Structures are given as structure tokens and as C-alpha cells.
């Protein structure tokens, strides 16, 4: 029985069922006075209740290892928290905990090794990309003919694109790590306190295109399961995205409010918009919809992807709508209030 988890359940259930019967037999056989039907009924109910309580207590102890294993998995999946499970038991539940413990540590080791390998490769790729750029710069300093200069400029431009791609790739990995390691505890976000940080990060881009930013603060605070810094990053990314695809001398509106049982943030612009068929493509990493802005601003292709990952990781939703090209766009964040 020690090595069979199923047999333990069956044994406890068998004993629990027969405790009332055994009790009644002893009561009838060894009670010296005459036994009335009422006495037998009351005694049967008492023994049944006692057997039920004992059976539930023992079954709860048997189920406890499964609950511990389930919590360990949830902690790792949601918060990347490593738990230490008891692995000294030899039944099926003990083997389950041991396998879960080993799988969690193997997964963590694999993730860390993968990140180290990717960072190493990214560093080496930068060196490889830097060699042609260095040669191109050397050629330009030698005052070559116009055709040679143009070729050198093309090489330099190509390597700059490679540098940006590598940097964006590293940024993607870093932000994914930050999202995974976040926790989901409720915390109070004070919006008057974070608005200056948001304004500071987008102010120059607004000035460059003479765009007005309107902030409609329908509430001053909210309890959310998201880190304040991550929320600021998402809002800044959405506003920056709106600036990029808005025309000069236009307006971007940001609203923070409650809608029935939901907390909502919207970022709305009157820029180039997009077709409804392109909505799914918007939030893909290194999306094919990576476009130049209205002032030829470049796009990394990962900004909206990261925003959506951050919001969904913290139990919210991020969606986009547009009436079509040149009709603006709205990005809407929702959390359960």
C-alpha cells in the first residue's frame, strides 16, 4: 500500500464505508440492555457522521501532495517562481512531485541557457556587422570616386540596419524576461503620479510634429495586477505609435476611465489607420505591417507585440480598431475592475 496511491484511496473509502456497519454490530452485540430501533437509528447516524469526517480528513491529506504540485506549477508558469517540492515519497503522488520538480528545473535551466546563447550570438553578430562598417568608413575617408563612395554608403546603411535589428532582438528578449518575472499582486496605481513620466518620454516627439496630446483622467487611481513601470511603458509605446502614424498639426487623445465593471485606457489618433483585415497582423513580432511613419520614422516591429504580451500577462486585454486607411485608430486596454 505504501507505493500505491490508488490503493490508499480505495482503502480509505472502504474503511469509511464500513465504520458505521462495524459500529452498529458492536452496539447491537455488546450493549447489555434492549436496543430500540430509534437507538439504532441515532447510533447509525452518529457513526456515519464520524466516518464521513474521518474519511474526508484522511482524503484531504492524500490529495494535499497534488495540490502542492499544482501550486508549484502555477507559481512557475505565472511568476517564474521556483518551488521546492518534497520528493521522498515513493507512491504515484511522490513520483508526480519529483517529476514536476525535475521538469521545472530543467525548463529554467533551458531558458537560462537559451538566453545566454542568444545574447552571445547577438554580441558576435554585432562584431561581424561592425567589420564591413569599419571598412566602409575607411573607404570614405580615402576620398574615393563618387561611385565607390555610394557603394560604401550603401554598405554602411546596410550594417546600420543590421545593428538596429540585433538591438531590437535583444530588447525583445529582455522585455520578455521582464514580463515573465512580473507578479500578479493587486497594487494601487496613482495616475496623477505617472502622467509626468509619460509626458516626459513623448514630449519631444509631440513637439517635432506639432501634435497636441489631450489627457482625459476619469479617475485618479485603480487597483490593478500590473507593475506601474510596465503600465507606463505600454502607454508610452501606444502614444509613440500614435505619434508615428499621425499627421502634423493633429491631436492624440488618451482616456483613463471605468466602463461598468472594467478599467479602460484608450489612445486615439486621427492618423493613417489600417484596414480591418490587418488587425491580427498589428500585434505580431517583427510584423509585416512594420511601416514608416508620416515623417518617415522607422519602426522596430516589436512595440505593439510587447505591449500586448505585457497586458495579457497581467490579465488584461489590448485591442485595436480603425475605420480604415486615413481614418485614425484606437488602441484600447481593458482590465477587470
Image: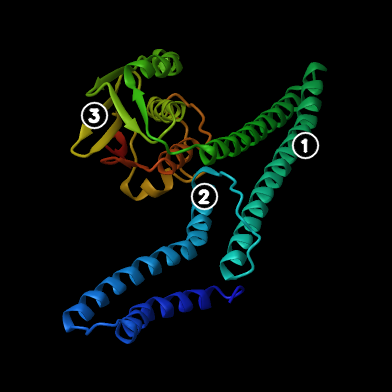
Tag 2 and tag 3, C-beta contact below 8 Å: no
> In what quadrant of the picture does the N terminus appear?
bottom right
> In what quadrant of the picture does the C terminus appear?
top left
**Of the residues under marks 2 and 1, which one precedes in the sequence?**
2
The numbered disc on residue 77 is 2
| Residue 92 visible in the current orientation | yes
For the residues labelled 3 and 1, the Cα–Cα distance comes to 47 Å
Element type at mark 3:
strand
For residue 46, what is the image quadrant? Answer: bottom left
| Residue 246 visible in the current orientation | no
The numbered disc on residue 149 is none
Element type at mark 2:
helix
State the residue in front, 95 or 328: 95
Q: What residue appears at the point 46 percent right and 26 percent down from the top-left corner?
A: 229
Q: What residue appears at the point 75 percent right and 39 percent down from the top-left corner?
A: 120
Q: What residue appears at the point 40 percent right and 69 percent down from the top-left corner?
A: 55
For residue 140, what is the image quadrant? Answer: top right
Q: Position of residue 171 (x, y in %)?
A: 59, 34
**Of the residues under marks 3 and 1, which one precedes in the sequence?**
1
Residue named by callout 1: 124
Residue named by callout 3: 257
Up/down of 312 relative to 151, above or below = below
Q: Select label 3 or label 1 by which is in front.
A: 3
Tag 2 and tag 1, C-beta contact below 8 Å: no
Q: Position of residue 275 (x, y in %)?
A: 33, 45
For the residues labelled 2 and 1, the Cα–Cα distance comes to 32 Å
For residue 195, what is the image quadrant? Answer: top left
Amino acid at each position: 500500500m505504501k507505493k500505491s496511491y490508488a490503493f490508499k484511496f480505495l482503502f480509505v473509502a472502504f474503511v469509511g464505508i464500513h465504520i458505521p456497519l462495524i459500529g452498529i454490530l458492536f452496539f447491537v452485540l455488546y450493549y447489555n440492555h434492549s436496543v430500540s430501533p430509534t437507538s439504532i437509528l441515532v447510533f447509525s447516524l452518529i457513526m456515519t457522521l464520524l466516518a464521513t469526517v474521518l474519511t474526508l480528513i484522511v482524503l484531504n491529506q492524500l490529495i494535499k501532495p497534488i495540490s502542492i504540485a499544482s501550486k508549484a506549477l502555477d507559481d512557475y508558469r505565472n511568476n517564474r517562481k521556483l518551488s521546492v517540492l518534497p520528493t521522498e515519497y515513493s507512491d504515484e503522488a511522490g513520483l508526480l512531485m519529483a517529476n514536476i520538480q525535475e521538469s521545472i528545473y530543467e525548463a529554467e535551466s533551458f531558458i537560462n541557457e537559451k538566453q545566454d546563447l542568444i545574447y552571445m550570438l547577438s554580441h558576435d553578430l554585432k562584431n561581424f556587422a561592425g567589420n564591413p562598417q569599419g571598412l566602409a568608413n575607411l573607404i570614405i575617408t580615402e576620398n574615393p570616386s563618387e561611385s565607390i563612395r555610394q557603394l560604401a554608403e550603401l554598405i554602411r546603411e546596410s550594417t546600420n540596419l543590421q545593428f538596429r535589428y540585433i538591438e531590437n532582438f535583444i530588447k525583445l528578449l529582455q522585455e520578455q524576461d521582464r514580463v515573465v518575472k512580473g507578479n500578479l499582486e493587486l497594487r494601487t496605481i496613482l495616475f496623477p503620479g505617472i502622467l509626468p513620466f509619460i509626458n516626459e518620454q513623448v514630449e519631444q516627439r509631440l513637439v517635432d510634429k506639432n501634435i497636441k496630446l489631450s489627457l482625459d483622467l476619469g479617475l485618479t487611481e485603480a487597483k490593478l495586477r500590473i507593475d506601474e513601470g510596465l503600465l507606463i511603458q505600454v502607454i508610452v509605446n501606444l502614444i509613440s505609435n500614435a505619434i508615428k502614424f499621425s499627421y502634423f498639426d493633429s491631436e492624440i487623445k488618451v482616456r483613463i476611465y471605468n466602463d461598468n465593471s472594467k478599467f479602460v485606457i484608450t489612445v486615439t489618433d486621427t492618423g493613417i489607420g489600417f484596414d480591418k483585415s490587418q488587425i491580427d497582423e498589428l500585434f505580431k513580432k517583427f510584423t509585416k505591417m512594420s511601416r514608416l511613419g508620416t515623417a518617415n520614422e522607422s519602426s522596430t516591429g516589436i512595440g505593439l507585440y510587447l505591449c500586448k504580451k505585457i497586458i495579457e500577462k497581467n490579465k488584461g486585454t489590448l485591442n485595436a480598431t480603425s475605420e480604415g486607411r486615413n481614418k485614425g485608430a484606437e488602441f484600447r486596454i481593458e482590465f477587470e475592475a
